Amino acid sequence: MIPKRDKQAAGQRLLSAFRAAGAVEIAPDILLPAESLLDLYGEDIRARAYVTADPIRGEMMLRPDFTVPVVQAHMENGAEPARYCYLGEVFRKQDMGETRPENPRDSEYLQAGFELFTRDPGADAEVFALFHRLLAPYGLSAETGDMGLLLDAVRGLPLTAPRRDALLHHIWRPGRFQRLLARFSAPVPPRDFPDTGAPWAGLRDEAEMQARIARLCDDMGVAPLPGIWSERLAQLFALRAPAPAAIARLRDLARDMPAIGKAVARIEARFAAIEARGIAPEQIVFEASHGRATMEYYDGFTFSFRAGHTGWPPVASGGRYDALTRVLGKGREIPAIGGIIRAGLIAEMEAI
Amino acid sequence: MIRLAVPSKGRLMEQTFEWFAARGLRLSRSGSEREYAGRVEGADGVQLVLLSAGEIPRELAAGRIDLGVTGTDLVREKLAGWASDLAEVAPMGFGHADLILAVPDCWRDCETLDDFASIARDFRAAHGFRLRIATKYHRLVRAWLAGHEVADYQLVDSQGATEGTVANLTAEAIADITSSGATLRANNLKILGDEPILRSQATLVASRAAMGPEMTALLAQLGLRA
């Protein structure tokens, strides 16, 4: 067991490095109002967060994540561009399935983080290079992705708007996404909606149901998506290679899928900027589906740094979350990217 | 000494007594109806405890009892990592109940879980909050919906009269235990999909910590293996 003091010390070193990179330290509350977090993350976070009740402030949650409170603080009184850093505990229940794991993961652990709010297109490379530099002594493997690439690929499919929106909505849920895609690639079986004679019950009103039935009826006449498109999508989603090879492959794929052209150019420019900061792109993996397994709020560049130990979560992870600032900004929005390092794992690697 | 816990009242207690009697073990309440202690005839070294069925999983996991009769639904809902501590020794063939997801019968466009996922997404966009499912089986329902990749919903706690929450506009759907479905129909709800979230029945459950020659002998007498 690594003493907590050593984990704190590792975190403090990371925090100083973030400060030296121009960040202002920010210290969000540990007790956060539960409602906005639950609405944002859904039941996945309720299953994993400690929810408690305050007689005056209502339902509160022990901080499950720093990004949301940092974005909220920035949206209330931040100037741009802004660089923030923080160090503190996050709390996640480890609800196991049927059997208890032999080595349960910590339910409270230290995160040292860095968040950058700016319209500068070089921000992705700046943040990645900073993390890469701080983590260089530990021999981790760097993996990256880009959710914007996948979203653009889906937007470019020859689909009706309702079909496209459904796919975009479920892109983070691979099984459901795949089932939808299969359904859209086959003729729609006829379906009727027989009256049950039951009286209306509940808040969902009849107009909402009629609107959905009309949408489903319209959809019955829609021609199937030609099979070639799900093949192309499958090829894109399965792409995983060192960055230069991945970029070459993406250029190929973009010939058949012009909708991803802009995203591919953006990815190329990002790796060029990363290379300009002294990191060889050959050593970075680009995995198209990387961001699908991460937090749903990442909608652009994503990255993680992994150690070889089995069962370890990524030592560091992060990404771009422009849409989140839109949701939390009440009308304002600002491009943002950030990431966290698990200070405890750093201390553990130093002890080995 | 094996400490055996059985449900303390009602049909479940009677059927449990019958199940053991058919295997040569006569269980009975000792003394008055109000007393929660019991007597065992037909086996030595067994102490009978009468407990609320809902408390039996917890007592088993805590090691205060060694063998108990409870529902598979309760074991799975109440004990995270239950299989590390407990072993289901035998399904007992009564107390059948399914944990199901039910929606208003008037939802003519909702037949499958895919329909439900799609409706939840529309509902969230239209109302600005996630579609609410009333239940007391939070862990089971959440794990099942996560496994099927349903998003855009939230669970609201309901410890009783769950079928009424839809009419009261405090939930849009419910997840609850049903045996006949009569209460659902009376509340204009219909069961979604072909497979329930969980099929539950009364089950003989043993604590893994209590496994040993004594337990093996008792189970053998009941015609069971550990």
Image: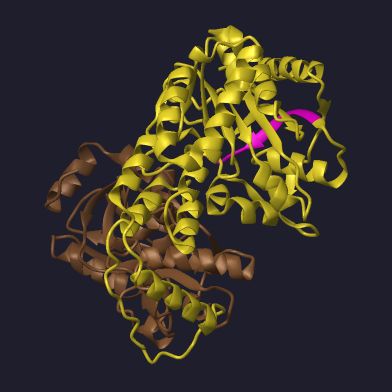
Chain colours: A yellow, B brown
Quadrant of the rendered image containing residue B214: top left
Which residue: 68% across, 31% down? A338
Percent position (x, y) of residue A89?
Answer: 68, 32
Q: Is residue A253 above or below residue A31?
A: above
Q: Is residue A339 above or below residue B58?
A: above
Percent position (x, y) of residue A154?
Answer: 46, 48
Q: Is residue A231 above or below residue B100?
A: above
Confirm whether the magenta stretch covers residue A91. yes
Percent position (x, y) of residue A128?
Answer: 63, 22
Percent position (x, y) of residue B13?
Answer: 31, 69
Image quarter of the N terminus of chain B: top left
Q: Is residue A17 above or below residue A55?
A: above
Q: Is residue B69 visible?
A: no
Quadrant of the rendered image containing residue B178: bottom left
Magenta residues, start to end: A83-94
Which residue: 31% across, 40% down? B208
Q: Is residue A117 visible?
A: yes
Identify which residue, B110 or B201, lies in the foreground. B110
